[in-house]
Image: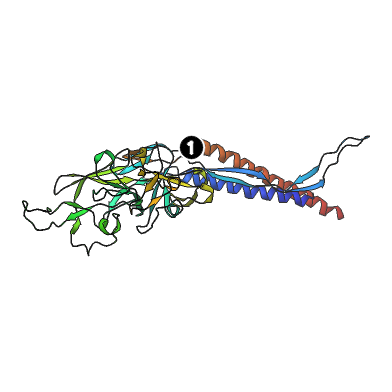
Amino acid sequence: MSMSGAMSAAISGLKTHMQALNVVGNNIANVNTYGYKTQRFTFKDSIYSTLSAGSEGTLTTGSTNPRQTGYGCTVGTIDLDMSSGDLVATGRDLDCTIGGDGFFLVGPKDIDVNSADAVKKLTLTRVGDFEFRDGYLTDGQGNVVYGFVNSTGTDTPGMLDPNNEGKISTDLVPIRLPMRDKGNGLAPDDPGYVAAGGTTYPGIADTGKNVAPEDADDANVDGYINYTNMKIDENGKITCTNSDTKEVVVVGYIALGTVENPNGVLHTDGPYYSAGDAAGSITVSTPNSAVTGSLRNGNIFLEDGTTVDPASQLLGGSTVGIMTSFLEGSSTDLATEFTNMILYQRGYQANTRIVTVTDTMLEELVNMKR
């Protein structure tokens, strides 16, 4: 290995330590970012030049060991630490944080995700800053939250009735508020009377899901009801009060997604992740398994009346609950980051000394001709 090799090794050390400092800087910059997961940087040594491969011992001599020279270091891994961060109280009834492993599932309104593969089209997040916008439950960036919604109350396959609080669909859909019924104009004592202002779920009759994209053509609805007392409990159940009828309405349940390798998710943008190949398969559940698959005669019945093999069911069990009026804080530990910053700074400084010493030696070599 020539002196230029020593300089090359030092340069690789400078580059790698700079990348390590970039990771530390990003961690510190996000010390107050909700849901931020700390990155961990590791080094690994770079390629080696083999001067001698070593030899086996003989009857008269012993073995010799390999002789190799290295060419510096490079990035080993940049891992995400997906452990839960501290709780930050917000005082908002619709803010949620997950009490363990798992992610909220968000995305556009029009994705059909009711299979183990299709559900990976959704985006994962740990930040539950939720509110209802235009009738849909969304996060702070406007992405629609997915879960299991209330339905018509008819006893159809795939409809569950947890705690006798309305039929809950086992299809994973965008969470949406029910709407105001126009009523049918009959007198209260007439057969089939439907009062104006009652709760109705447009789109259920045609699609089996509370996800009708347009409501203008539905003659039975008259916009969204003015709901009050919006709440989410530890099971992810969303309830509110119909201000017209004063009845308590169960909107549905928030879904959680769990992957086999949480540290293998791909950080995409802001608080969002995607479940790529490294994350493994994804299982969907509700907090504390408030909603489960409808198993009848050995088959899972979905909302459209079809059956699937129980091994491929979308819903799984979960013992993880959620807490409301809290958000998850950053997992950055400033003491650890400052310590790493000092170590990386000194490592960078030491590599600059190798460059300086090598430069001095090369200068002496050039000056030998004088």
Camera sees residue 316: yes
Q: Which of 281/312 is in front?
A: 312
Image height check: is 144 above or below 348?
below
Image height check: is 5 above or below 64?
below
Residue at horizontal 42 percent and vertical 37 percent from the top = 100
Q: Specify few, some or many for label 1: CA neighbours under 10 Å numbering under 14, 14-19, or 20 or more.
A: few
Q: Which residue corresponds to mark 1?
A: 333
The quarter in which the C terminus is drawn is bottom right
Provide residue 351's location: percent of width, then percent of height.
Answer: 67, 45
Q: Residue furthest right?
A: 60
Image height check: is 97 above or below 172?
above
Number of numbered callouts drawn: 1
Provide residue 324's location: percent of width, then percent of height.
Answer: 32, 39
Residue at horizontal 91 percent and vertical 37 percent from the top = 58
Camera sees residue 139: no
Provide residue 243's location: percent of width, then percent of height.
Answer: 16, 48
Q: In the rendered view, how is the structure colored?
A: rainbow
